[in-house]
Image (cartoon, grey):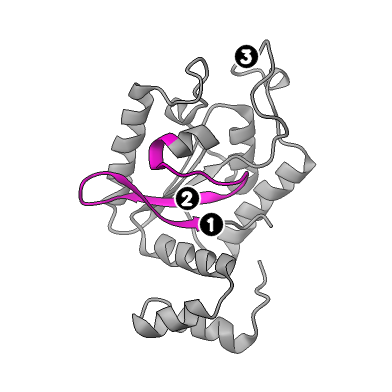
Amino acid sequence: MPSSLPPEMQINRRTFLATGTAGTLVLSALPAWAQQEASAETLLRQGGVVAVFRHALAPGTFDPPGFRLGDCSTQRNLNDEGRAQARRIGDWFKERQLQPAKVLSSPWCRCVDTATLAFDSPQVWPALGSPYGARETTGAAHLRELRAALSIASARSNGFEVWFTHMFVQSDLANDSTRSGDALIVRVDRGAQPRVLAKLSVTG
């Protein structure tokens, strides 16, 4: 995504981002969305984090009656705006030459489609699935899987993962959530608890 900042601000942001006080001063001159984007990009380059995306825009709230996993015609699906959001996610990473070590997706069609439009070939992982049949909380077994995988990803000396999931899963894992098509940048802290380090919004 081309920056709307003047050239000198673009250079300063990249040069001083991680240099203590100087980096803080530069970030403080940026709009809030740009601060979050800059922080997220830095964290992804450092590695040891997961970008936990909520699927792109799929109008509605819950899946309709008669929902069947594996049958996209029975589910909420991305609309044109959602598909455009998904492509912008992929473009943002490509423009910055940021290549995830893994791309994992909920088996729900709106997540698989978001991941596929952004990164081509995601690995489907049931633990990222919508809490179907469990109201608005992720199943305990799935939550344990997510936390274990996040701990492993956080221990990487370099590289990052991208996960595509649902608002309720974001909330249960990290006690936070995003708009459609946005991500939480997460790693575990010293107490092995998920911690949100930044939010990433590239879909406009």
Q: Residue at x 52, y 26 (%)?
A: 130
Q: Amino acid at mark 2?
A: Leu
Q: Residue at x 36, y 29 (%)?
A: 143
Q: Residue 197's spot in the image, x, y percent?
A: 39, 57
Q: Tell me which numbered mark, 2 or 1, is placed earlier along the sequence.
A: 2
User: 90 or 25, which is in the foreground?
Assistant: 25
**Residue 36 lies in the magenta-colored region:** no
Q: Residue 66's spot in the image, x, y percent?
A: 67, 10
Q: Is residue 16 left or right of residue 183?
A: left
User: 97 or 20, which is in the foreground?
Assistant: 20
Q: CA distance from mark 2 to mark 1?
A: 6 Å
Q: Residue 131's spot in the image, x, y percent?
A: 49, 23
Answer above or below: position of 152 versus 200: above
Q: Amino acid at mark 1?
A: Leu
Q: Residues within 10 Å of mark 1 (few under 14, many from 20)?
A: many
**Residue 175 lies in the magenta-colored region:** yes
The residue to which callout 1 is attached is 200
Q: CA distance from mark 2 to mark 3?
A: 28 Å
Segment colored magenta: 172-200
Q: Residues within 10 Å of mark 2 (few under 14, many from 20)?
A: many
The residue to which callout 3 is attached is 68
The residue to which callout 2 is attached is 184
Q: Residue 18's spot in the image, x, y percent?
A: 38, 76
Q: Quadrant of the N terminus?
A: bottom right
Q: CA distance from mark 1 to mark 3?
A: 31 Å
